[in-house]
Image: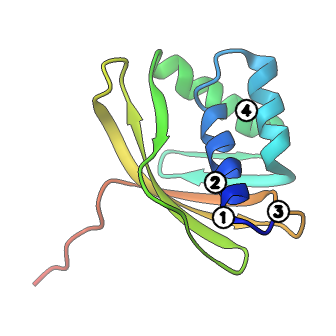
Amino acid sequence: METLAAYERLVDAHLAAYCEPDAARRLALVRETWSVEGRLVDPPLEARGHAGIADQAATLLSQFPGHRFERTSALDLHHQFLRYGWRLCNPAGETVLAGVDFMDLDVDGRIARVVGFFGAEPAVKA
Protein backbone atom coordinates (compact mmCIF):
# COMPACT_ATOMS: atom_id res chain seq x y z
CA MET A 1 0.00 0.00 0.00
CA GLU A 2 1.35 3.35 -0.94
CA THR A 3 -1.39 5.96 -0.76
CA LEU A 4 -3.09 7.56 2.20
CA ALA A 5 -6.44 6.61 0.66
CA ALA A 6 -5.41 2.93 0.68
CA TYR A 7 -4.51 3.12 4.37
CA GLU A 8 -7.81 4.86 5.10
CA ARG A 9 -9.71 2.07 3.31
CA LEU A 10 -7.80 -0.52 5.35
CA VAL A 11 -8.60 1.15 8.68
CA ASP A 12 -12.22 1.79 7.74
CA ALA A 13 -12.67 -1.86 6.65
CA HIS A 14 -11.13 -2.97 9.96
CA LEU A 15 -13.62 -0.83 11.89
CA ALA A 16 -16.46 -2.04 9.65
CA ALA A 17 -15.77 -5.62 10.77
CA TYR A 18 -16.70 -4.55 14.30
CA CYS A 19 -20.04 -3.23 13.03
CA GLU A 20 -20.92 -6.15 10.74
CA PRO A 21 -23.76 -8.33 12.13
CA ASP A 22 -23.34 -11.08 9.51
CA ALA A 23 -20.71 -13.56 10.75
CA ALA A 24 -19.54 -14.61 7.28
CA ARG A 25 -19.16 -11.02 6.09
CA ARG A 26 -17.41 -10.05 9.35
CA LEU A 27 -14.89 -12.88 8.92
CA ALA A 28 -14.36 -11.87 5.27
CA LEU A 29 -13.57 -8.29 6.37
CA VAL A 30 -11.09 -9.60 8.94
CA ARG A 31 -9.42 -11.83 6.34
CA GLU A 32 -9.19 -8.89 3.90
CA THR A 33 -7.48 -6.61 6.38
CA TRP A 34 -5.53 -8.77 8.85
CA SER A 35 -2.47 -10.97 8.53
CA VAL A 36 -3.08 -14.62 9.43
CA GLU A 37 -1.19 -14.27 12.72
CA GLY A 38 -2.61 -10.83 13.56
CA ARG A 39 -2.95 -9.78 17.19
CA LEU A 40 -5.38 -7.25 18.64
CA VAL A 41 -4.90 -5.96 22.19
CA ASP A 42 -7.38 -3.65 23.94
CA PRO A 43 -7.55 -2.99 27.68
CA PRO A 44 -10.07 -5.75 28.47
CA LEU A 45 -9.49 -8.10 25.53
CA GLU A 46 -6.89 -9.81 23.40
CA ALA A 47 -7.43 -11.76 20.20
CA ARG A 48 -5.17 -13.57 17.73
CA GLY A 49 -5.71 -14.80 14.21
CA HIS A 50 -8.64 -14.30 11.88
CA ALA A 51 -11.12 -16.42 13.86
CA GLY A 52 -10.13 -14.88 17.19
CA ILE A 53 -10.45 -11.33 15.91
CA ALA A 54 -13.81 -12.06 14.23
CA ASP A 55 -15.02 -13.68 17.47
CA GLN A 56 -13.94 -10.64 19.47
CA ALA A 57 -15.92 -8.42 17.10
CA ALA A 58 -18.97 -10.69 17.53
CA THR A 59 -18.67 -10.42 21.31
CA LEU A 60 -18.58 -6.63 21.14
CA LEU A 61 -21.56 -6.59 18.78
CA SER A 62 -23.54 -8.69 21.25
CA GLN A 63 -22.61 -6.36 24.12
CA PHE A 64 -23.39 -3.20 22.12
CA PRO A 65 -26.20 -4.04 19.68
CA GLY A 66 -26.86 -1.34 17.11
CA HIS A 67 -23.65 0.52 17.96
CA ARG A 68 -20.99 1.42 15.41
CA PHE A 69 -17.32 2.37 15.36
CA GLU A 70 -16.21 5.52 13.55
CA ARG A 71 -12.78 6.93 12.87
CA THR A 72 -12.52 10.39 14.48
CA SER A 73 -9.18 11.54 13.12
CA ALA A 74 -7.03 11.53 10.07
CA LEU A 75 -4.37 8.84 9.97
CA ASP A 76 -0.93 9.58 11.35
CA LEU A 77 1.63 7.27 9.79
CA HIS A 78 5.31 6.55 9.39
CA HIS A 79 7.10 3.45 8.19
CA GLN A 80 4.70 0.54 8.76
CA PHE A 81 2.98 2.17 11.75
CA LEU A 82 -0.14 4.27 11.98
CA ARG A 83 -2.49 5.68 14.58
CA TYR A 84 -5.97 7.12 14.54
CA GLY A 85 -8.75 8.14 16.88
CA TRP A 86 -12.08 6.32 17.01
CA ARG A 87 -15.35 6.34 18.86
CA LEU A 88 -18.12 3.86 19.55
CA CYS A 89 -21.55 5.42 18.91
CA ASN A 90 -24.91 4.21 20.15
CA PRO A 91 -27.88 4.04 17.75
CA ALA A 92 -28.67 7.71 18.53
CA GLY A 93 -25.16 8.73 17.41
CA GLU A 94 -23.91 9.54 20.91
CA THR A 95 -20.36 8.61 21.86
CA VAL A 96 -20.24 5.72 24.32
CA LEU A 97 -16.48 5.16 24.26
CA ALA A 98 -13.56 6.79 22.47
CA GLY A 99 -9.90 6.03 22.12
CA VAL A 100 -6.90 5.66 19.88
CA ASP A 101 -5.51 2.64 18.06
CA PHE A 102 -1.89 2.07 17.11
CA MET A 103 -1.51 -0.25 14.13
CA ASP A 104 1.51 -2.18 12.84
CA LEU A 105 1.32 -3.40 9.24
CA ASP A 106 3.06 -6.43 7.76
CA VAL A 107 5.14 -6.38 4.57
CA ASP A 108 1.99 -7.04 2.50
CA GLY A 109 0.17 -4.03 3.97
CA ARG A 110 -2.16 -6.09 6.16
CA ILE A 111 -2.70 -5.48 9.84
CA ALA A 112 -0.18 -7.38 11.96
CA ARG A 113 -1.06 -5.82 15.30
CA VAL A 114 -3.42 -3.27 16.81
CA VAL A 115 -2.96 -1.90 20.31
CA GLY A 116 -5.90 0.15 21.51
CA PHE A 117 -6.23 2.66 24.33
CA PHE A 118 -9.54 3.93 25.70
CA GLY A 119 -10.22 7.51 26.73
CA ALA A 120 -7.90 10.49 26.97
CA GLU A 121 -4.30 10.27 28.07
CA PRO A 122 -3.89 10.32 31.85
CA ALA A 123 -2.82 13.62 33.39
CA VAL A 124 0.67 14.04 34.78
CA LYS A 125 0.64 13.80 38.57
CA ALA A 126 2.10 16.85 40.28
Labels 4 and 3 touching (C-beta < 8 A): no
Give the alpha-carbon distance from disc 1 to disc 3, as whole Å.
12 Å
Q: Which amino acid type is marked by label 3?
A: Gly
Q: Which amino acid type is marked by label 4?
A: Ala
Write down the residue under mark 4: 54
Labels 2 and 1 touching (C-beta < 8 A): yes
Write down the residue under mark 2: 8
Q: Helix or strand or loop: what does disc 1 sit on?
A: helix
Q: Position of residue 17 (x, y in %)?
A: 67, 33
Vertically, is 109 above or below 79? above
Residue 50 appears in the figure: yes
Q: Which amino acid type is marked by label 1?
A: Leu
Number of numbered discs visible in the structure rendering: 4
Write down the residue under mark 1: 4
Quadrant, the C terminus? bottom left
Q: Helix or strand or loop: what does disc 4 sit on?
A: helix
Q: Residue 87's image quarter?
A: top left
Write down the residue under mark 3: 109
The residue lying toward the viewer, choosing from 96 and 10, is: 10
Viewer-nearest of discs 4 and 3: 3
Q: Which amino acid type is marked by label 2?
A: Glu
Q: Helix or strand or loop: what does disc 2 sit on?
A: helix
